[in-house]
Image (spheres, rainbow, N blue to C red):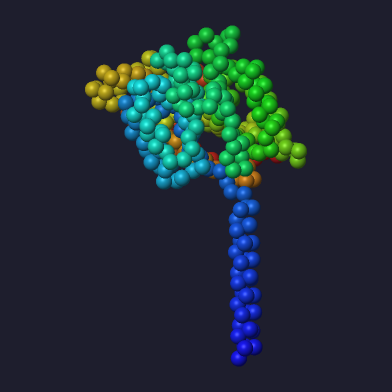
Amino acid sequence: MKALINKHIVIITFLTLLISCTFSKSNDNKENKKSPVTFGICTDVHYNVIHDATKRLKVFIDDMNRKNPDFIIQMGDFCYPDTSSDEFMSIFRSFKGDKYSVLGNHDRDNGVSWDDAIKYFEMPAAYYSFDKKDFHFVVLNGNEISDTITNYPRFISDKQLTWLNNDLDKTNKKTIVFVHQSLFDSHGVINQDTVRDILSSQHFKNGKRKVLVCFNGHSHIDAAENINGVWYVAINSMSYHWVGGEFKHKSYSENIYDRYPWIEYVCPYKDALYAFVKIDEDGTIRISGVHSTWVGASPDSLGFVSKYYKRENIVPWISDRILKQAQ
């Protein structure tokens, strides 16, 4: 009888050790497996221009709280950084995870300083970087002053470029860049060639490119282009495309324009546009965007032709895309 009990004890001990080892190995595999990074992205909401900006932002935040990405980011032209925008900002801050911001050229149209804007948007600096999982993220400031642009500056200074190069040198992670103004269209950063040269010159020791993609807002278009192995993606405005005074018209009921007169100069989107982005460990970029329609007249129906952007990129949606990392 004693021998039988001892035999059972040995068997139980063996099974316990086996289960423990299997569980430990399973946990190790789970911890060692690199997971994709996800984030929600929106831009150019223009709270002080469009009458339903608060509603649009809430749609985005509610969806992101359901999807639970690693973080969200807004890429500028968000709102005036003062108490008039507090309710609007409280919606952005209601996202349950990490939140980041980019400075847009219209974010200080009310005359506040850049320092005040940085403080209001709770940014660490005008340009900065951070890590999430096995990825590195860089936020640039495209609003620096140059000798050739006197209205809204679209420039990245030598000081910032030096910082960017040093920041990229230090990381061993695949990198994603955010900037308000484009680095690939004619209405973007005026020294964009220099910035792109820095991004495309960065490689890992195995020869693969370090920078995967650069996202921008500002243009209110939907576009993507690969230049020297780096993807450049324009995220469409959450709210509208600007057509200007020559194409002034009304898309909404008359009473809205007393408080929001600038809406006469835009073609609004029916729905809030934004995107959910997933980047796999191998560098594949998956963009899931919102598709909408025009409210009232479209730019085409008004006869609008842009000086800066292709007709096919002026649309009321953000395209779904799968972008592969270049070798």
- Image position, residue 59 (x, y; %): 37, 38
Asked if residue 7 is positioned above or below residue 270 in the image, the reply reads below
Task: State the image quarter where residue 44 is shown.
Answer: top left
Question: Residue lying furthest bottom in this view?
Answer: 1
Q: Relative to the observer, which residue lies in front, 201 or 144?
A: 144
Question: Residue lying furthest front in this view?
Answer: 2
Asked if residue 106 is positioned above or below residue 68 in the image, the reply reads above
- Image position, residue 194 (x, y; %): 66, 21
Question: Residue lying furthest left in this view?
Answer: 255
Residue 217 can be seen, yes or no:
no
- For the point 57% across and 40% down, the residue is 132
- For the point 46% across and 45% down, the residue is 68
Residue 43 can be seen, yes or no:
yes
- Image position, residue 220 (x, y; %): 46, 26
- Report how many numbered discs are placed on residues in the image: 0
Q: Relative to the observer, which residue lies in front, 241 or 5?
A: 5
Q: Relative to the observer, which residue lies in front, 291 or 177?
A: 177
Task: State the image quarter where residue 247 is shown.
Answer: top left
Q: Is residue 252 left or right of residue 203?
A: left
Q: Quadrant of the C terminus?
A: top right
- For the point 59% across and 31% down, the residue is 129
Task: State the image quarter where residue 22 is shown.
Answer: bottom right
Q: Quadrant of the N terminus?
A: bottom right
Q: Relative to the observer, which residue lies in front, 297 or 11?
A: 11
Q: Is residue 214 left or right of residue 61?
A: right
- For the point 60% across and 19% down, the residue is 156
- Image position, residue 293 (x, y; %): 38, 34
